[in-house]
Image: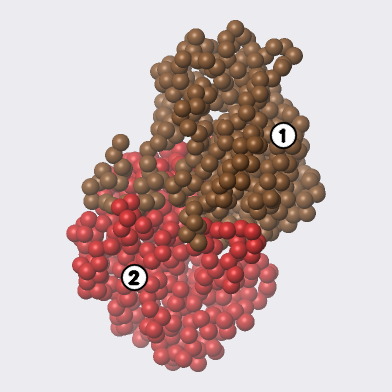
Chain colours: A brown, B red
Amino acid sequence: MPNLLNVLGFMNYSHFGSKFTQPNGITQLMEDLGNAKNSNNPNLVMLGGGNPASVPQVNTAFINELNHLVKNNKIAQIMGLYDGPTGNDEFRAVLANQLTQEYAWNLTASNIALGNGSQANFFILFNLFAGKMADGSHKKVLFPLAPEYVGYADQGLTDDMFVAIKPEIEILNTPNGSKQFKYVIDFDAVKAVLANDNSISALCVSRPTNPTGNVITDDEVHQLDLLAKQYTIPLIIDNAYGDPFPGCIYTDANLTWNSNIILCMSLSKLGLPGLRTGIVVANNEIIKAISRVNGAMVLSPNSFGPSLVTRLIKDNELLPLCKNTILPFYKNKAQVAVSLFDEIFADLPVYLHKVEGAFFMWLWFKDSKITSEQLYQKLKKQDVYIIPGHNFFIGIEDSWEHKHQCVRINYATDEATLKKGLETIKTLIM
Amino acid sequence: MPNLLNVLGFMNYSHFGSKFTQPNGITQLMEDLGNAKNSNNPNLVMLGGGNPASVPQVNTAFINELNHLVKNNKIAQIMGLYDGPTGNDEFRAVLANQLTQEYAWNLTASNIALGNGSQANFFILFNLFAGKMADGSHKKVLFPLAPEYVGYADQGLTDDMFVAIKPEIEILNTPNGSKQFKYVIDFDAVKAVLANDNSISALCVSRPTNPTGNVITDDEVHQLDLLAKQYTIPLIIDNAYGDPFPGCIYTDANLTWNSNIILCMSLSKLGLPGLRTGIVVANNEIIKAISRVNGAMVLSPNSFGPSLVTRLIKDNELLPLCKNTILPFYKNKAQVAVSLFDEIFADLPVYLHKVEGAFFMWLWFKDSKITSEQLYQKLKKQDVYIIPGHNFFIGIEDSWEHKHQCVRINYATDEATLKKGLETIKTLIM
C-alpha cells in the first residue's frame, strides 16, 4: 500500500510520520469496524471493538451528576478553564484520598497524573522508558504474558520496542466439563529474558487482560513486582477494567501498588469512553515527568471527564455504583457468555479462556484448519465482526500455530446478538 | 537542574523522555502561573496565560445547549461511545458544510480531523513534516514571523526542528499619537532561507498571532501561500483566535484555505478550553495521516467538545454568537487596553503592537535597561504575572536586544486588574 503522505507527491515525511501512518493489521481492522458501525446495517453483529455497554442505571447516575454540576454553576468553570498539565487538581486529590482509604497506599494528588485517555498515557510511558535512550542505547518493554492489548503494539517512537513472552496454557478441570483454559505466565522464560537481555527497561501487563479476560493471580503480580525491583525497572499495570472502578473482576484478586508500580486506570470502561480520561498512579518523579510531557504535547488534559466524577468519588458514590450495578451487570453478561459457549461449542475442540474479568471472550479453536484471519474475513462477509487473535500476540513469531487459533469477542452486548455471532462462528470452523 | 527521571537513580530515560521532561524557561513559567492561580491570593494580578474570558452570554448559550442534549437523550451516547480516530463524524460533516457555506471552499468531513486540543494537533503536524525524515535527512519548520507562539518551541521529537525569521518593525502613524508599531514579514529574509536551505519542509504562522495580537495581512498570507506552493511545502496557519470562531479579529482580514494550506482551529478561545478540542482543515491525505496517528497515540479524540457545538453550527447559531457577542466583548477589551496604554505610558518610550486580534497586548520597552526576564521576576514579587517576551522569539539569537524588550499581557480580564498591572509595570521600567 502506498504511504499516505507520499501519495501527494510533493510531501516528504518524517520517520515518525512514516511509522505512525503505516497501514497495518489493526488500523485496517479499526477502519472495518468503523465502516460497519456507520453502515446502519440492521443485521450487523458487532462483537469487535472495546466499547463498554450502555448500563441504564450508570447513565442515569452520570446524567444526574451533570445536572447537579449545571445547577450548582460549576459547568462554566469546568468548560472554561485550562487545567494544569498534570490534570484536574481537585479530581487528583479526591482520587488519591479514595485510593488511600481503600488500599492504605498513602497517596496524595502528587501521585496522580491525568491524560486524554489511557492510550495517551501509555504513549508517554512507553516512550519515556524505552526506545532510543538519551545515552544512545536501545531499551524495550517486556510483556511477560502474550497475548496482550493490541493498542500497545504501534505506540513506539522507535522500532523494535516491545518483547513478549508466550504463555503457558493450562487446561482447566471444570465441574460441568466446560472446555476452558487459562494463560499462565512462563516465569522461567521471563527470568531468562531479564537475565540475558539487559535492554529490558520496563515490564507491562494488563490485568484484567485485554483480550483474554484473564486476571493474572496475586502471586503472579507479586513475582513480577519482585522481578521489577530486582532489575530496578518499573512494573506497569494496565488496570483499565479492574478495581476499584469499573471493577469488572469476577474472581478473587487484590490490587497492588507501590512506588515501583505504575498503575494505569481509566474512566472509559465505567461507560465514559467519549470523555477520554486516563489516570496514572505512580511515584511523584514519574508524575512530574508525565506532567512535563503533557505540557509540551497537549498543554493540559481535558477537565470534563474528571470533573464529572469528582463529587461521586468524594461522597463515596462511585464505588458502590461499581459494586452494586456495574459488576453485577457485566458478571451476568459473563455468565451468559459462558453458557452460550458451553451450549454452542459443546462437541467441538473449542476452548474458552476462563472468564475472570473485563468483557471479552477469548476462544481458542484448537486443531482448527482455518486461521483467525481467515475466520475474520469469512465472518465479515456475513456482517459478524470479531477481532482475530493474532494481532494480540505482539512480537510472537508467526510460526507458532496457537497465534492463529484464537479470536476476541466483546460480550458487552445483548444475548441474541452474541448467540447469533457465536453460531455463525460455529458454522465456519466446523 | 537534575533530570527528573534520573533523580530516581534506577531509571534510565529515553531521548524523548529527556527532551520532553527538560525544565526550560516556559515550563518554569507555567509552573509559576499555576502556583499563582492556586494561591488564592486576593492581590494577584494575573495577566499571563492564554485563558479566554468568561463571557456570561456565551456560557449561557453552552449551558443551554448542554441542557438540550440532556433533554433529548443525547448525552449518554456522547459520553458512552468512542468516536473514530479522525474525531466525531457528525461534527466534522456539519463544520465542513458551514465552512463551505461561509467561504465556498467545497469541503467535506474528509477534510477535517479533530484532536484533543490544538496543541495536540500541532504535535502531530510538526512531527509529520519535520525532524528526522524517513530517508534519513533532517527537515525543519520555518516560522516566517517571530515572535511566534511559545507552545511550538518544545514540540519537536528531534532537536533543531524550527527556524524563525526576525520581523520588520514598522512604527505606525496613529491619529492620536498613540505609540504603536506592527511586525511585518521580512520576505527578503524568508525567500533567502527558502532558496538557500533545502531542509525547510513547512511554513507555519499564527494569525491572529499569539503573542502579539498581530494579524498578518491578506497580502502577506498570499505571498506565503505562493512561496509554499513554489517550494512544494505546506503552509500551516494557526487560526485559534480567528474567523469564523471565535472571530477575535479587529481589522480587515480574510480567511484563506486551499489544499496546500493546513488550517488549524480550536474551540478553546470560544470559552471551552477545558474541553480540549482542536480542529485541522486540510486535504484528505493529511487528514488520513492525522487519523492514523491519532488511532495509535490516543485511540480517538474526545466527543464532548465537538458534540456540544454541533447543533449550534448546524442551526447557524454559533457564528452569530461570535459576531454579536464574542467579537464585541473582546473588541471592547481591546479598546480599553489601548486607552489604558495611551494613558499610562504616555510620556515613556514604550510601544504597543497594533491590536488587531486575539486578546494579548504586546508591549515593547524600547531602549529599556531592564530585560523582559528581569521585569518578569520583579513583577512576580509584586504578584503581577505577565509572560516575558523573549520566550516567543523561537530560534532567534539572544544577542538581538529587541528580543529582551517585550512582554505579553492577556487583557481578557477586568479593567481594574489590567490597569493595576500596567501601572506596576510602569513603576519598574522607568
Q: Which mark is residue A217?
A: 1
Relative to residue A47, is residue B314 drawn left or right?
left
Q: Position of residue B357 (x, y in %)?
A: 39, 67
Distance, label 1 to label 2, CA atoms, is 56 Å
Q: Nearer the viewer, residue B44 or A183?
A: A183
Q: Which residue is mark 2?
A: B164
Proximity of marks 1 and 2: CB atoms separated by less than 8 Å: no
Considering only vertical position in the picture, is A63 above or below B31? Answer: above
Q: Position of residue B422 (x, y in %)?
A: 52, 81
Q: Residues within 10 Å of mark 1 (few under 14, many from 20)?
A: some
Q: Residue at image x 57%, y 9%?
A: A348
Q: Residue at x 46, y 91 (%)?
A: B369
Q: Residues within 10 Å of mark 2 (few under 14, many from 20)?
A: many
Q: Position of residue B354 (x, y in %)?
A: 37, 75
A230 in relation to B187, above or below? above
> Considering the image in quadrants, where does the N terminus of chain A appear?
top left
Residue B3 percent across, percent down from the top left: 58, 66
Q: Residue at x 65, y 36 (%)?
A: A188
The answer to which image quadrant residue A291 occupies is bottom right
Q: Please give the chain letter of the residue carrying mark 2.
A: B
Relative to B138, residue A326 above or below? above
Picture residue at 49% right of the left edge, 53% below the top: A138
Image quadrant in which you'd find residue A289: bottom right
The disc labelled 2 sits on which kind of residue?
Answer: Ala
